[in-house]
Amino acid sequence: MVMPIDFEWRGLRPEFVVLLVIYWSMVSPQYFGLLSAWFVGLLHDLLEFSPLGVNAIGMMIVAYLAHMFYPRIRHYVFWHQSLWIFMFVAVFSIYSNWVSSLVSQRESSYFFLFAALTSALLWPVLVLMLKSIQIRFRLSQTIHNNY
Amino acid sequence: MGVPIKLLFTKGPSYFSRVVLLVIITVALLVVGRYTQWLEPIRSKLDVIAVPFYWVSDIPERVSLWFDDRLLSRQEIEAENKLLRNQIRVQESRLQQMASLVAENLRLRQLMNSSEIVQDRVLVAELIGVSPDPLVHKVIVDKGSNDGIYVGQPLLDAFGLMGQVVSVTPYTAQVLLITDNSHAIPVQITRNNVRTVAEGVGDLYELRLRFVSSTMDIKEGDILVSSGLGGRFPVGYPVAQIEKITFDPGEAFATVVAKPAARLDRSRHVLLVFSE
């Protein structure tokens, strides 16, 4: 999340927290609701020094999308899921870029969408990792689903 | 109480209305945070939460630095030692001149009845974090209010001015770099003392000068130092060097691009200046 990255490459940083939010809202929507996503976003605001609430709304949007589409997406194969993840993270990036442009911190190009790309590429790895954690600690009731 | 009866309407407020409620709360939070200072005290308390994250993410860097320090061959150390000695020799010879210059400067200032320039006290700090958002140019240093750091304090590296402290926790401080979009610093040109304002544009290697008219005496290669106007930054620290000037007859002002003197993306050891 806050791992130091070279300045030139900072645009490529995957939106790790967004991926986590998507994952948990798809795996256990009954426990990880919008309020949890909201709190995660608030914490993310603190870490990123952005105005309190920016990422909170963004995370909520993403969680809302994930809740809406999870019955469909979680039966897809990895690369197909990655496409959807790309869309979700792109929505998040566009939203946060829009908000930062309101407070006059604009990014001039569409370079910010690269973060969505790297996030989509990271998704399969992350799913495999989190799934093993989930099974290991018996975290969710929906283990025996496709997830 | 027995087995709970499954009621039809037990859900409370609907999903959608909950979303709307949360969004309204957040937007209110944003508006309050943007247009008032009410959230500042809470925010500076909450910033402590971020400290361990940055501390942990800095561990690999510290480990590699530790190895860099420990795993050195004898030849490398000898070479470095030689280099450093040479540097000290050169700098000492410059310092000798400096002493006489300082004395002269003082005398001239007394002649002109202007106030003396006091030596600034500095504190060495180390960078432990960089803002993950590419649009926000902030760094975190490992000294906080326990070390006497205060909001508004200037930060330097060995090459020039880096930025100013914008928020402190007991153990760390957030520093806004001079290249951040929301930052501007009053500067003057060393060649002729012309005063202007250097603004950040969100690029780590670039500053822009505002309101430079086409008649202003300014050249590529001019060195900008802090002018001390505004009372926030001390006088005379190098800020940037003019890189490119474009006069467009259609525009009211020239576009002047300057390159920051400080190594904003590379310096790890920085100095905090106590200017009072």
Image (cartoon, coloured by chain):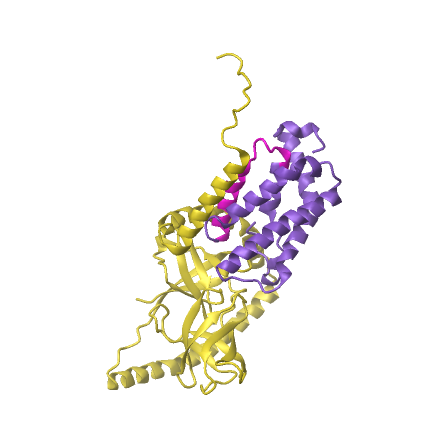
Chain colours: A purple, B yellow
Of B21 and B187, the residue lying toward us: B21
Of B126 and A65, the residue lying toward us: A65
Dominant secondary structure (helix, strand or loop) of the stretch shown in magenta: helix
Residue at (51, 82) in percent of width and height:
B221
In the rendered image, residue B163, in percent from the top left (x then y), is placed at 44, 65
In the rendered image, residue A40, in percent from the top left (x then y), is placed at 52, 42
In the rendered image, residue A72, in percent from the top left (x then y), is placed at 70, 37
In the rendered image, residue A146, in percent from the top left (x then y), is placed at 72, 32
Residue at (34, 83) in percent of width and height:
B100
Residue at (52, 83) in percent of width and height:
B220
Asked whether the viewer can see residue B32, the reply is yes
Q: Which span of residues is magenta-colored? A: A26-49
Location of residue B106 (image quadrant): bottom left
Of B131 and A104, the residue lying toward us: A104
Is residue B185 magenta-colored?
no
Is B9 on the left or on the right of A74, as rendered? left
Asked whether the viewer can see residue A35, the reply is no
State how many labels appear: 0
Of B116 and B29, the residue lying toward us: B29
Is B209 on the left or on the right of B44, as rendered? right
- B194 shown above or below B163: below
Quarter occupied by the C terminus of chain A: top right
Residue at (52, 40) in percent of width and height:
B19
- B66 shown above or below B14: below
Is B94 on the left or on the right of B206, as rendered? left
Is residue A48 magenta-colored?
yes
